[in-house]
Amino acid sequence: MDTSGLKAEGTQWDLSELYSGPEDPRLAADLTEAQQRAEAFAQTYRGKLADGQLDGPALAHALAEYEALSELDHRPSFYASLLFAADTQNPRAQQLVQRTREAATAVANVLVFFTLELIALDDTRLAALLAAPEMAEYRHYLEALRRFKPHTLSEKEEQILNQKHLTGSEAFEQLYQELTGSLRFRLGVDGEERELTDGEIMALLRHSDRDLRERAFTTFLETHAGHSLVLTSVFNNILLDHKIDCELRHYDDIVMPTHLANEIAPQTVEAMMQTVERHYPLAQEYFRLKARLLGVEKLKNTDLYAPIEAAAEEIPFAQARELILTAFGRFSEHFAAIASDFFSRRWIDAEVRSGKRGGAFCAALSPRHHPYVLCSYNGTSRDVSTVAHELGHGIHYSLSRRQNLFNYDAPLVLAETASVFAEIVLTRHLLSQTQSPAARRALLCDLLEEIYGTVFRQTALTRFEMAAHQKRRAGQLTAEDLGDLWLREQEKLFGSNVELIPAYRWGWTYISHFIHSRFYCYSYSFGELLTLALFQRYLDEGDAFVPGYMALLESGGAQRPEHALAHLGIDINQPEFWDRGFRVIEGFLADLRATL
Ligand SMILES: [Zn+2]
């Protein structure tokens, strides 16, 4: 792979392990096979659980087949989603997303009886089935599944909901992605009118020219505002769709489906978020320090990510790779070895291309396949951290490949445990190599801005999202309403320390999590605070910490978060635990003050 390019030119992923292309005959064959095997599965097992005809070993056998079938069923749509992310304007990718999604829904509908029968089992009967040793690896899956018992509808109703999702929330998600992916931003840069992608224009928030930063973000937001009719409609429908779901499924609390999926108690999350809000003054202290470093009277929100040193050097992609692998290697050779594969085996797509999905992600299909990473590498130090972050996810997925498919994905609140840790490990390595106060200052600012963006900002985002869902229950929201709710939560975080640019009232339009992963944002705050506390443990214990931490990552989604963490002696229901995370942040702030 050619990594000589300054901006990762040529670093494209190789998806050929999945399929050779959208026209690969194996793809069509998999779609057909998934449908046939699902029908055969239904023929063999429908009604058997309810009738008591399956014993423990037979159920374990059925679950293994169900697992294999789920993977086969998801492979084509997984491939389509990667193709689409790499080139959102490619009509073949768009069509394939649609076609594979429809096929997956058809298969899911044939199979839905099975989970419904598992949910419907009475507790005594389930206990008898779980007594079989073959069932041990499925215990957690069944327990987690059965928590949805009070919220599950009949088979016919579930099937109808699945089918109507295609033209309901999923259609709005797709519309949102295609619209935002197609946006181009016209901006005067160095006296020249340019047309930028979202990745390119957002990168200008880290430019040293204050006026350019403000113009860039204003253009970005106002371009979204130009589509307010569609964006407001998408938001309203996504919010209404969830309201209807909650009513149909008897959820009093609109966040409860997320909490159940995360296997976390609502009061644990609320306590965490309140702790974050109590510490907003800590973020505000950083904003005042940053204003001082930039030599401005008052920070604007477009100054938050401004470089504090003039013209930071661009880091070629090859150098980024070396830095990351060396930093990971200092923590654990195994960590570095896994990350290295992503580069050498082309599991990462890093170059900047027009039409590529914005942001960065790591995606994984199943324990039988390696994960894939996508990002747009622009050569800044933040981009290096982003690559480290996504590789952290990749390492996490790789380590949990020993789990079965049901236990593969870490619960959301643990999903950032390796990614954030990887970023801190990288920064610490860079700090250890840096003597000059100015350079240390730049690194600490990067780190603290990452923490601000994850711990503090994501809590404010979640509060906005909760408020929007709550308000939608009473009726349609206007773009004005959404802007008001947005600003209200942002102002709590920024206080009087930061001036928000006028166009920022459109800030809600570009956070795609609100559209495709409802209430995801709180798990960023949760995960980052948790990881900061874990990192403190690593500093205290040194190498002795590593095996327990690796075991936590290897456990994937095999245990509830509070149980997985209890093995490391952590009790997430203790408020002091969350305070510990903030002590680490206070330490970084003190380090930064020491450089002044
Ligand atoms: Zn992440």
Image (cartoon, rainbow, N blue to C red):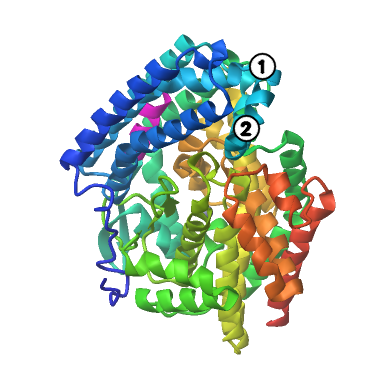
Q: Which residue is mark 1?
A: 122
Magenta residues, dominant SS class: helix
Report whether 31 appears left or right of 458: left
**Measured Cα–Cα span from mark 2 to mark 1:** 17 Å
Q: Are marks 2 and 1 in contact (CB under 8 Å)?
A: no
Q: Nearer the viewer, residue 589 or 525?
A: 525
Q: Quadrant of residue 316?
A: bottom left
Q: Residue at x 40, y 79 (%)?
A: 319
Give the residue type that dot 1 points to: Asp
Classify mark 1: residues with Cα within 10 Å, few (<14), some (14-19) or many (20+). Answer: few
SS category of the residue bearing label 2: loop
For residue 111, side relative to residue 246 (left or right): left
| Image coordinates for residue 306, horizontal then vertical, percent | 52, 67
Asked if residue 359 can be seen in this view, the reply is: yes
Image coordinates for residue 310, horizontal then vertical, percent = 48, 79
**Looking at the image, is mark 2 or mark 1 nearer the viewer?**
2
Instruction: Looking at the picture, tell me which residue is in the foreground, 281 or 36.
Output: 36
Residue interval drawn in magenta: 168-178
Residue 374 highlighted magenta (yes or no): no
Quarter of the image with the N terminus is bottom left
Q: Residue at x 54, y 59 (%)?
A: 419
